[in-house]
Image (cartoon, grey):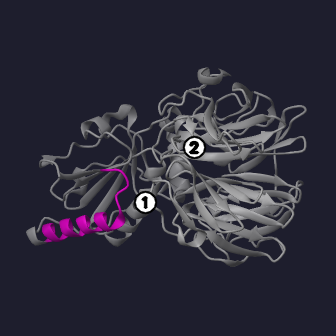
């Protein structure tokens, strides 16, 4: 607990989202206020959003949550980028854009995420850094409400807001597609914002819709199954099995295309709080935001974003465990046991090494899967704040929160997400921009005369590169012979509950 001090007022001349006007603490007098200091790249910030939503709904007459977005990366300072994050994560409370870290400094915040609890009389009564659990927050909120009800200082009232999702409903055919996978039978698309998987032919014909389109954790037939913001996928062509990182459910799923059934194979549905290396039986071991995965032989390797580790699952025994990473959020090379990662979000391999898009250190990492089992940094500064947009060699290279990586023909394709570019990286660390001019937008064309908006997934098949252009809600296709970029259209595909799905 910190000394009783009056909460500094929020600036009125800053950009506000999820409201049609600037808000002040003064107008919330009589309510409990939680200020959530966050930045939308941060996995720990994302983990507490469901807890805040739970409290907002439970105490809607007496609690107000205000998001204070204090950006880490340059791209996160853009109001439109923050608006897209609010839509993607279904945030329903007002958010102020903390330009220049002014609010952060006034409240003496030191880390993401941090919650500031303000009582109904306008005094700061607690500051909590890190991932606080729901029960602790609920207990504190309930206690405050009871205290001030007894004092007569609570003001029960409903607050009316104009939400971004009311202004911009997610009715596009795809919504924030996270990853895309090109295979022998067509394209698999993680339609993350619609909580489903889309399977199409290469010419845009819809073959399967997997999932109801509502968030949940339900196994079963394709039209009954439920996902929660699924991301990475890998395909076993021989057995016609798709493996899926069901990120916000904290589980791995198996999709049997022959029998058209979805099954959970690892995770309990609860987020693990254990960041130390460990493991166990698949369905008895809680996971923490699996973001991408790749199959090598009979092993799944998983980019486990939550604990900053690489995991492995033996598909024969069902045992899942940490493969590399201590759990510290850092960029440390060396042996598997002493290495460290920072929110790994993309994974690919060439049979000898895994290649990781290590997003929070804006670096590409190599992880040995044959002796001597070493971890190395292929390119990027390897620092939590060492980001930018610089081509070059090894440590000279600057990326900005890269989320996707794909190995093909001895090179790596990288989705340099917050730079809105696609880059080509050699295995020795030379990095060159190939697609995108660095300005967010949706423009087809050739080479650098093209625009993307936070691309985050890549897949190569034959002479084509497929790109999940996340904030544009589309899939792009690149002819690798000419670097011509086009936007794909999917015949008859629409958002859930917007139109009748195609007869599959």
Residue 30 on the magenta segment: no
Q: In the visual, does 225 lie left or right of 31?
A: right
Q: Between 374 and 225, which is closer to the camera in this rendering?
A: 374
Residue ID at (20%, 46%): 7
Across and down, in percent, residue 38 comes to: 41, 46
Snapshot quadrant of residue 9: top left
Please name which of the two marks, 2 or 1, marks the residue nearer to the observer: 2
Q: Quadrant of the C terminus?
A: bottom right
Give the magenta part as a residue range. 129-149
Q: Secondary structure at mark 2?
A: loop
Q: Distance from label 2 to label 1 (Cα)?
A: 21 Å
**Residue 2, percent from left and from top:** 16, 48
Q: Quadrant of residue 344?
A: top right
Q: Please tell me whether the stretch drawn in magenta is mainly helix, strand or loop.
A: helix
Q: Which residue is mark 1?
A: 273
Name the side, left or right, on which 13 lies relative to 174. Answer: left
Residue, disc 2: 336
Numbered circle sitting on residue 460: none
């Amino acid at each position: 607990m910190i000394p009783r001090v009056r909460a500094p007022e929020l600036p009125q001349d800053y950009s506000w989202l999820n409201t049609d006007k600037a808000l002040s603490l003064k107008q919330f007098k009589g309510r409990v206020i939680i200020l959530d200091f966050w930045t939308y790249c941060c996995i720990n910030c994302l983990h507490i959003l469901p807890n805040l939503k739970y409290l907002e709904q439970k105490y809607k007459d007496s609690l107000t949550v205000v998001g204070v977005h204090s950006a880490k990366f340059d791209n996160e300072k853009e109001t439109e980028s923050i608006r897209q994050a609010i839509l993607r994560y279904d945030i329903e409370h007002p958010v102020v854009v903390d330009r220049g870290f002014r609010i952060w400094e006034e409240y003496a915040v030191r880390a993401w995420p941090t919650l500031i609890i303000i009582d109904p009389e306008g005094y700061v009564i607690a500051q909590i850094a890190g991932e606080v659990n729901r029960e602790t927050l609920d207990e504190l909120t309930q206690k405050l409400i009871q205290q001030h009800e007894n004092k007569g200082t609570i003001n029960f009232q409903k607050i009316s807001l104009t939400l971004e999702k009311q202004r911009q409903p997610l009715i596009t055919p795809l919504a924030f597609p996270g990853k895309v996978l090109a295979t022998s039978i067509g394209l698999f698309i993680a339609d993350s914002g619609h909580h489903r998987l889309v399977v199409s032919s290469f010419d845009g014909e819809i073959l399967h819709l997997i999932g109801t389109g509502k968030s949940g954790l339900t196994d079963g037939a394709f039209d009954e199954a439920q996902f929660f913001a699924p991301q990475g996928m890998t395909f076993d062509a021989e057995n016609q099995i798709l493996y899926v990182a069901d990120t916000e459910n904290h589980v791995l799923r198996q999709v049997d295309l022959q029998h058209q059934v979805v099954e959970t194979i690892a995770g309990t549905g609860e987020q693990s709080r254990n960041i130390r290396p460990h493991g166990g039986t698949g369905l008895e071991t809680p996971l923490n935001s699996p973001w991408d995965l790749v199959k090598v032989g009979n092993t799944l390797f998983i980019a486990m974003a939550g604990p900053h580790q690489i995991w492995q699952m033996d598909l024969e025994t069902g045992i899942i465990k940490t493969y590399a990473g201590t759990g510290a959020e850092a960029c440390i090379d060396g042996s598997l046991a002493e290495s460290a990662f920072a929110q790994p979000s993309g994974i690919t391999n060439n049979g000898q090494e895994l290649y990781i898009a290590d997003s929070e250190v804006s670096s590409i990492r190599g992880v040995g899967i044959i002796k001597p089992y070493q971890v190395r940094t292929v390119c990027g500064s390897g620092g939590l704040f060492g980001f930018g947009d610089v081509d070059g060699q090894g440590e000279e290279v600057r990326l900005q929160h890269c989320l996707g990586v794909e190995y093909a023909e001895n090179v790596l394709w990288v989705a340099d997400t917050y730079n809105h570019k696609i880059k080509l990286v050699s295995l020795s660390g030379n990095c060159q921009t190939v697609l995108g001019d660095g300005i967010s937008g949706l423009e087809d064309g050739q080479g650098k005369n093209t625009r993307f908006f936070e691309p985050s997934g890549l897949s190569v098949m034959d002479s084509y590169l497929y790109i999940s252009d996340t904030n544009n809600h589309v899939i792009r296709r690149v002819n690798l012979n000419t670097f011509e970029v086009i936007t794909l259209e999917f015949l008859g595909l629409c958002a859930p509950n917007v139109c009748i799905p195609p007869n599959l």
